[in-house]
Image (cartoon, coloured by chain):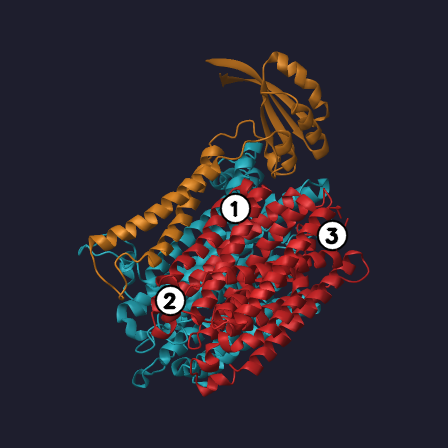
Chain colours: A orange, B red, C cyan
């Protein structure tokens, strides 16, 4: 179902004012908020706590997959065409450990990238409502709220350098 | 310092008893008809605990050089381990008596004349006493200096720390060559020195962690140690587990691949022959896989019950590691496990704890 | 973590954007002259390679017994250069060292380009370059597989993993900075940077996942750095040749690689910060830190040299002893002494604070180290092959102009890639520098 909500964008040039606003906003539960900043801000993570990122599960499964392939593939090849070289046993675990190690890193890193793209919702096409100043030295936030909520939130942004309110259609 | 007199007193009584028992068994063992059985376990313990004590000073020196502030509380614990070093010099002197039962090149194995220039008792003990004595002296001076520097009286002893670190690497390389490599007089491996001083530092870290956990629970002011300190030390321990294993692996792989008789003999005995094979695997599991799996998790690093258990297992692993390096060279076909081995080892532990206790008196934990 | 401030005082976030974007402006004549020079170098290298391909491997100086010439010296040299990039980036990130921030991007770029150059040399060395895909494990016409027991095949896996992972690390690290450039420009540039920025918006959720992913990349890259050069060292150490078969080779090569890599970073940073006016971001303190790292690795390398000599004597093994005597006093002796001077003695001067804090002298030292580390690989590879066990098979090797030409060509390729990168991409990790300055201004909860 699609419903219409208000969208409020606030831009701050001053960090102290910005973090004060975030502090006040952190009191609200279930707030649909996106905070923008040119660098990661640990104070924001503390005020708006995040679950540990799911990226690490991607990395972990990639690494495990890499280890399995790194052993299974060489073992398969030496059994497929049994050829003794260098007086070493066919299944030379010592050598395959190295292949497995490298593939663990390779797959781990590849899956980490996938995890990042998946969780950070990248790549994305549209930059609508994004302010180029967010990558320079401004901070900001976009909040989607219904009318009642908006009225309650409105006073918080009294110190913002720029506040824009429009409406947007959201999937509920 | 928290007053916990009853506990400290009990510990002193127990350690005293352990030391007495240890001395008794050292004397009995040395006078028995199998003196090398006692002296080899004596050597293993000597290397283990001297390495741990030295690692305390090295830990502090590394923090000094890297200007790291995270370990400022942990280093106070580490430094008090150094008080074992003067004791270990005495232990080294005692070992001269047992030398004929330790070093095969004295009588059992013939070595070329060229090698005798290096491998002879006066020179061996001369250089090691000089080296370890110098390190002991410098470590103590360094710790005193850095403690006065903390109060702002003198400049930070950074240059001193650099010198200490370089000497540590050089002297411990020779300790490894003399007390581990020369036990198989024909065998040689270039990585042995680096392998040994890394192992010492790694073991030292685990003992620092155990000591810090114990101190936090029973001795130190309540807010002295923080969870974050343990988290950081846990990370370091995790990193060193991997680094140490990579050195073990580098030595193993090169020798295994080359498969040259004079090199492989050493490795074959330890990796493929009973009973050393089991012990080799156990130190790999205790010293590498256990910390690798448990310390990977954040909870494993921050929960002090878990991390101190891991540290204990690492210490045990390090002991087995040194045992496997030393003992098969001296008695290749017998694994001696009896009351004598336990008594001597416990005697060393007692001596170490008692000197650690003295160290905490001499270099108290800041309030 | 140290609390030292590594930047010029009173630097604001907007300053950083403009300073970093300065390098991406329209280039001048000097830039095109430099590009022309690099293209000429590449051209010469390509001509030499063409000659080798059309005439045959005989144009290179390699023959029995020295079958590994300077192609493999160059391979190890470039892989070594490639090491400090990921090291500075990843290990220092894990140790929370603040000084990595303004040099990590350049170092990472260096890694990616150096490893590309490194990857070429084994192929050139093998001769039939058009069959390079034979290196990869696939069932070929005779259903044979590659030999997984061979250290040379480990190299294929290690170097290609290293290339992939360091490229990923490099590109992922640039996403937020590409967004900065995207937002500064309009038109075509906006579109191009937009592709690399992948629609990055800098929301707190994105930053949260980004930080975790970056940390994981660093945690994977650190053991990778160590493993790759260990494996390169095992190309030699797995054999039984005196001078190659040595257990210390892995840590010895790894520290040597980091040593040469740090030197190369200094060599490149010095002109770069002058040309692109980055003195506020890349300060003397960064050079000092790099020099200290160079000193540390130099000490480890020196330790390895001395240990090898000591053990060669201690072993009482004729072959070992002769091999090392030949290294120091034989036909290739001068190279050995150049190596020792450059890698062991000259870096010791870094102990003096006056030298450590003088950027110009550090630049000169770094050039000596680059030369010394190339010599080191040359000495290890060539002297051991020239005299193995059997005097009947002894021989000497000297590189031909074809081999030197290809080496020069690889330098041209490396520098061309690097200059193009500087012209196109943010040379300093903008968001990280901003984060650090922000952290200093507003304080923080972490120490």
- How far across and down, in percent of the image, does residue B303 sit? 58, 41
Chain designation of label 1? B
Q: Earlier in the sequence, mark 2 or mark 3?
A: 2
Kindly indicate whether the residue at mark 2 contacts the one at mark 1 (C-beta within 8 angstroms). no
Residue at the image point whose x is 45% and y is 71% from the top: B330
For mark 1, what is the residue? B295
For mark 3, what is the residue? B365
Of tags 3 and 1, the one toward the viewer is 3
For mark 2, what is the residue? B269
* Circle 1 SS class: loop
Of tags 1 and 2, the one toward the viewer is 2
Residue located farthest toward the bottom when viewing the structure as drawn: B113
Q: Foreground: C360 or B210? A: B210
The quarter of the picture where residue A63 lies is top left
- How far across and down, in percent of the image, does residue B124 sit? 56, 79
* Circle 3 SS class: loop
* Circle 2 SS class: helix
């Amino acid at each position: 179902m699609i419903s219409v909500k208000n969208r409020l964008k606030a831009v701050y040039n001053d960090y102290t004012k910005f973090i004060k606003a975030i502090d006040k906003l952190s009191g609200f539960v279930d707030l649909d908020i996106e905070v923008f900043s040119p660098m990661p801000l640990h104070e924001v993570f503390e005020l708006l706590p995040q679950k540990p990122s799911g990226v690490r599960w991607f990395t972990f499964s990639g690494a495990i997959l890499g280890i399995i392939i790194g052993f299974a593939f060489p073992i398969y090849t030496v059994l497929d065409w049994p050829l003794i070289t260098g007086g070493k046993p066919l299944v030379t675990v010592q050598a395959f450990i190295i292949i497995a190690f490298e593939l663990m890193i390779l797959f781990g890193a590849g899956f980490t990238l996938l995890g990042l793209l998946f969780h950070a919702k990248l790549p994305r096409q549209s930059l609508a409502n994004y302010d180029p100043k967010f990558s320079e030295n401004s901070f900001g936030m976009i909040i989607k709220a219904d009318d009642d909520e908006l009225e309650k939130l409105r006073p918080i942004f009294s110190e913002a350098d720029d506040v824009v309110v429009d409406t947007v259609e959201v999937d509920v | 310092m928290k007053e916990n007199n009853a506990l400290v007193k009990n510990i002193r009584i127990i350690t005293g008893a352990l030391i007495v028992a240890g001395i008794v068994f050292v004397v009995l063992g040395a006078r028995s008809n199998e003196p090398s059985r006692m002296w080899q376990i004596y050597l293993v313990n000597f290397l283990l605990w001297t390495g741990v004590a030295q690692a305390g000073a090295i830990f502090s020196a590394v923090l000094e050089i890297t200007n790291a502030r995270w370990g400022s509380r942990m280093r106070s614990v580490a430094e008090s381990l150094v008080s074992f070093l003067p004791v270990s010099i005495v232990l080294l002197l005692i070992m001269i008596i047992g030398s004929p039962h330790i070093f095969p090149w004295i009588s059992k194995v013939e070595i070329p004349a060229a090698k005798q220039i290096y491998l002879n008792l006066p020179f061996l003990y001369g250089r090691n006493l000089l080296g370890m004595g110098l390190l002991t002296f410098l470590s103590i001076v360094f710790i005193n200096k850095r403690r006065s520097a903390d109060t702002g009286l003198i400049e930070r002893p950074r240059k001193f720390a650099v010198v200490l670190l370089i000497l540590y690497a050089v002297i411990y390389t020779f300790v490894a060559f003399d007390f581990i490599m020369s036990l198989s007089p024909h065998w040689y491996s270039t990585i042995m020195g680096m392998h040994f001083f890394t192992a010492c530092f790694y073991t030292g870290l685990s003992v620092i962690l155990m000591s810090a956990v114990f101190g936090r629970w029973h001795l130190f002011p309540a807010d002295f140690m923080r969870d974050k300190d343990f988290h950081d030390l846990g990370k370091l321990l995790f990193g060193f587990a991997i680094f140490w294993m990579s050195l073990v692996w580098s030595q193993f792989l090169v020798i295994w691949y080359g498969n040259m008789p004079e090199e492989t003999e050493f490795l074959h005995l330890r990796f493929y022959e009973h009973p050393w094979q089991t012990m080799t695997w156990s130190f790999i599991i205790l010293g590498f896989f256990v910390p690798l799996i448990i310390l990977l998790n954040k909870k494993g690093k921050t929960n002090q019950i878990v991390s101190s258990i891991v540290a204990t297992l690492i210490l045990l692993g390090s002991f087995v590691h040194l045992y496997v390096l030393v003992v098969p060279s001296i008695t290749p076909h017998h694994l001696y496990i009896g009351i004598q081995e336990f008594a001597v080892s416990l005697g060393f532990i007692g001596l170490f704890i008692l000197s650690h206790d003295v160290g905490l008196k001499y270099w108290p934990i800041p309030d | 973590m140290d609390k030292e401030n590594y930047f010029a005082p009173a630097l604001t976030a907007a300053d950083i954007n403009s300073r970093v974007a300065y390098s991406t402006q329209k280039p001048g004549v000097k830039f095109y002259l430099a590009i022309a020079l690099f293209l000429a170098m590449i051209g010469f290298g390509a001509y030499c390679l063409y000659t080798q391909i059309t005439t045959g491997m005989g144009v290179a100086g390699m023959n029995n017994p020295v079958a590994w010439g300077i192609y493999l010296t160059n391979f190890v040299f470039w892989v070594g250069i490639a090491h400090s990039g990921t090291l500075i980036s990843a290990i220092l990130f894990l140790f929370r060292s603040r000084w990595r921030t303004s040099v990590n991007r350049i170092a990472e770029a260096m890694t990616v380009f150096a490893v590309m150059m490194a990857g070429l040399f084994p192929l050139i060395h093998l001769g039939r370059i058009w069959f390079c895909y034979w290196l990869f494990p696939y069932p070929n016409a005779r259903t044979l597989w590659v030999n997984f027991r061979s250290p040379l095949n480990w190299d294929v896996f290690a170097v290609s993993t290293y290339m992939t992972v360091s490229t990923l690390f490099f590109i992922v690290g640039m996403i937020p900075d590409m967004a900065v450039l995207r937002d500064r420009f309009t038109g075509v540039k906006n579109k191009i940077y937009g592709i690399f920025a992948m629609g990055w918006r800098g929301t707190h959720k994105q930053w949260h996942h980004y930080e975790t992913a970056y940390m994981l990349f660093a945690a994977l890259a650190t053991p990778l750095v160590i493993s790759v050069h260990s494996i390169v060292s095992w190309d030699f150490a797995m054999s039984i040749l005196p001078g190659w078969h040595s257990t210390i080779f892995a840590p010895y090569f790894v520290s040597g690689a980091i040593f040469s890599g740090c030197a190369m970073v200094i060599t490149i940073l010095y002109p770069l910060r002058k040309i692109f006016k980055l003195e506020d971001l890349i300060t003397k303190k960064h050079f000092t830190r790099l020099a200290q790292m160079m000193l540390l690795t130099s000490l480890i390398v020196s330790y390895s040299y001395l240990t090898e000599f000591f053990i060669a004597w201690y072993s009482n093994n004729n072959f070992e002893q002769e091999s090392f005597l030949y290294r120091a006093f034989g036909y290739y002796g001068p190279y050995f002494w150049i190596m020792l001077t450059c890698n062991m003695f000259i870096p010791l001067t870094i102990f003096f604070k006056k030298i450590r804090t003088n950027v110009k002298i550090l630049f000169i030292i770094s050039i000596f180290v680059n030369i010394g580390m190339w010599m080191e690989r040359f000495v290890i590879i060539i002297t051991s092959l020239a005299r193995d066990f059997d005097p009947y098979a002894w021989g000497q090797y000297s590189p031909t102009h074809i081999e030197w030409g290809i080496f020069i060509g690889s330098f041209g390729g490396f520098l061309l890639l690097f200059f193009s990168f500087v012209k196109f991409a943010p040379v300093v990790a903008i968001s990280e520098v901003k984060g650090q300055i922000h952290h200093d201004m507003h304080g923080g909860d972490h120490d």
